[in-house]
Image (tube, helix red, strand yellow):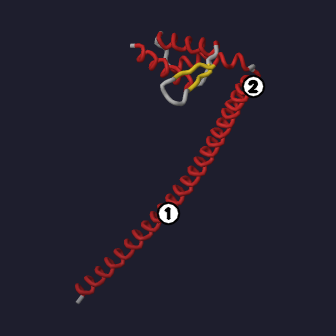
Amino acid sequence: MIPMEKFLIGYLILVIIVNMMSFIVLSQCKKQRTQLIEETDDIHRNMKAFVAKLEQVNNELYHQLVDYNKVKESKFEDRIRILEEKLENRDISTTSKEFMPINQDDEEQTYAITSIDKEQDNEKISQLYKQGFSTKQISKLVQSDFGEIELIINMYKKKQSYQK
């Protein structure tokens, strides 16, 4: 029976070794799980910080845009006020000469205010356009709004197409 005892002792040692190995593997798995949880929490914290910073930058940009729009609005309001004051200050005889009919075919006649300065500006803009300057370049040269220059160029193009 001695070989059977040796077999049982060997088997028992093998079971103990397997049991110890399983404990080692389980402790390593637990460490990895803990590490993964910490990394996941760290990622979540970083994402929250990133989103908060992004929202802060977005709010700053929004406020800058609002301020920019307020400045532009006030400039437009000032220009409108100045133009209204100019219209009020003119006497009746000069204003009647400065209004010219644009379209007499319609039942309602449309009138445009023509001023020598505006005509000179429009001529300058059309000359620059003929020379190949872009709308953006012309607006910088004339120191006027991009949309206004674009409108004048479009009117010039229509005028040219009517003349053909």
Q: Which mark is residue 164?
A: none
**Local SS, label 2:** helix
Report the amino acid beneath label 1.
Ile
Identified by mark 2, the residue type is Glu
* Vertical order, 22 against 7 (above or below): above
Dot placed on the residue nearer the N-terminal end, 1 or 2: 1
In the picture, measured across the screen, residue 62 lies left or right of residue 107, that is: right
Closer-to-camera residue (103/119): 103
Q: Quadrant of the N terminus?
A: bottom left
The residue labelled by disc 1 is: 37
Q: Which of the 4 image quarters holds residue 24?
A: bottom left
Residue 88 image label: 2
Of residue 133 and residue 42, the one placed in the foreground of this image is: 133
Judge from the rendering whether residue 164 lies leftward or rightward of residue 47; answer left or right. left
Q: Nearer the viewer, mark 1 or mark 2?
A: 2
Quadrant of the image occupied by residue 5: bottom left
